Amino acid sequence: MISSRGLSRCTLKVLALTLLTVATGTAYGQRANEDAVAEALDAFGSTVGREAIGLYSANSARGFSPSVAGNLRIDGLYFDELNFGNALGAAVRGSSVHVGIAAQGYLMPAPTGVVDYQLRIPGNDLVTSVQIGDATYGVAYEETDVEIPVVHDVLSIGGDLGFGRNQSYDSAEHSEDWTGALIARWHPNDSLVITPFWSVANHLEFGEKPDVFIGDSGYPRYHLADPMGQPWTNLDASSSVFGATAHFAFDDSWLLSAGLFRALVFFPVQQIPFLINTNSLNQGEYTITAIPAASTGSTSGEVRLAKIINTTHLRHTFYLRVTGRDSSIESGPGDTKDIGPATITDVPQIPAPAFNPGVNTDVKAQQFTPGVAYGTLWPSVGQLTLGAQKVFYHRTVTTPGVAPESDSNTPWLYSAAAAAFPTHKLVFYSSYTRGFEEIGLAPINAANRNEPVPAQVTNQVDAGVRYQLLPKLQLVTGVFEINKPYFNLDRFNVYRLVGSTSNRGEEFSLTGDITDRLNIVSGIVVIDPKVRYQSGAIIGPTNQEAIGPIPSFMSTNVQYHPAAISGLILGATVQFTSSRYAVYPNINLPAATTLGADVHYKTQLFGKNATFFFQAYNLADTYGLTPNASGQLTAFDARRFELSLVVDL
């Protein structure tokens, strides 16, 4: 049964009001028919609306993070998000992860993988889609999309407004989220399409819970909802993204594409509790750090010109491409107060101390990257993609009272990908990519917390095979190796370059229709993550298994469409996480398997398309922890249930 903290009375009232509103609607919509499993082309990661499936995501791919690496795109065009907030969410329909075979033919791939966001572009129909939901632990949300055709086939505008609350948020006692977006599609002729958009988000947290860091005396046991908050500690993050994409086709074989984006984030002064050196009894040392207010901004974009030449057997495409960004990130170590011993579920409740958060360091980065690429496709035979880029990168660190420090880098980047089609069922592929990627920010427990470190040259090689088992069922298996400079905390707790890391692995994807009524999206990744530390960087062995990447992970989604009930879809989810180190070589976390189930029912309400969703997560209430390299732990969600409704008005 759903717990007493489950379906709230207020959400049921909203449901009733929504059903009354449906009766007056006049147009056919689209959200009610969205289905992540049905739309997945592989098991390497995709999102559709609120559903996310597959092995990888914007935060995790082959043991690294595409988002942290700066490998994000909006409708294929380069975008720098700055790793803060979720401002883009209200403007996008979904995303896909491009790694392995999913990166074949993709322009200028990256070693850590590329995540491409698809804008929710308004069409030619008047549409209002309403989604409401309620879940265990006081979770409720509402989102409304509107699409308005102003001039048929020429101009359409769209908007989105959403609100969500969580009475037991993983980082705080309570959270609220407001999101909104405006987007337009201007298509004045057959050659030109311009899509401007503006998306905003405001995330509020009340009663911050401690960030838990492991010690050397075993690992704690808790779920995300368990930690106890400090009432006066809050967080407020306001973020926005605005910009536009444009595509202009001319002379039947030329395509000019461009995107320009501006991302902004502001944090007021915030207080972050920590529970450090946490042991197997859930005991640790409780501290609170006040961090100064900070602003972050980045302007980024891309201009791309493509020329297509078709011959008797081949299609050639030549590209000229320029990407750029200009970013500024503020960060400061803040002021820390030691409170004393505590446990995860029982922290001292104290009045707010007098903090002196101090001042920020400002890190400015400018990057300009011109490049050329060539792609050729020989249908039923193979394809080849080649690319070369020259990076011009400059970074300046300005700390109050200290002379600014600058560094520059101008590497050449190369990429090559090839695929062969020996039969209509079989594909062999291989690729090499040399990239220039961000490593990210210093973790929140570092002496130089939140400070960006310099971007680094990285590389990746992979190969594999895809085989069409059935007309609509395909198997992909591949191997990969990714090499990067390694940044982590040194023996003085400073986040800096301390060595090199290599992730070698294998991945498998089984995706499609087993029968007309049975669908599957299943993936497995196995990684051997290794770190070689510089001499003197840490105390301990210099050759270690990297903390963070999961050595083995499996995710399987299955859907069944019963013939007896039209519109009914029964689903099941299984995820397996192997054992992994939290502290090498002393603390190894046990393997964990989580089970989920869901029911989708597509129907008509007052003549309008509607879908009811019931989802159950972690049915066995499996306990598990995910560690990262800095020692921070993230617990698995406890058993929870969610009920939602999408109606197209």
Image: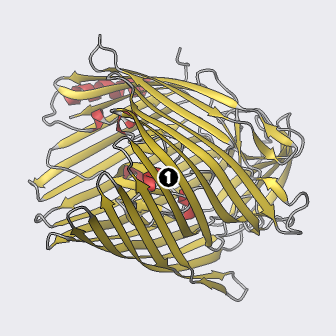
* Residue 217: quarter of image: top right
Q: Is residue 165 above or below residue 57?
A: above
Q: Which residue is located at x 63 percent, y 62 percent?
A: 269
At which x and y percent is residue 326? 48, 77
Residue 470 occupies quadrant? top left
Q: Is residue 622 left or right of residue 415?
A: right
Q: Looking at the picture, which amino acid does disc 1 mark?
A: Gly
| Residues packed near mark 1 inside 10 Å, few (<14), some (14 to 19) or many (20 plus) | many
Image quadrant where one finds the C terminus: top left
Q: Is residue 632 left or right of residue 574?
A: right
Q: Nearer the viewer, residue 417 or 459?
A: 417
Compared with 169, 276 (above or below) is below
Residue 378 point in image, percent of width and height: 30, 59
Disc 1 target residue: 100
Colouring: secondary structure
- Give the camera-side residue of 160 and 546: 546
Identified at 41% across, 43% down, the residue is: 426
Residue 310 percent coordinates (x, y): 21, 66
Q: Secondary structure at mark 1?
A: helix
Of 608 and 315, the residue lying toward us = 315
Q: What residue occupies the far left of the structure in this picture?
A: 152
Give the quadrant of residue 490. Answer: bottom right
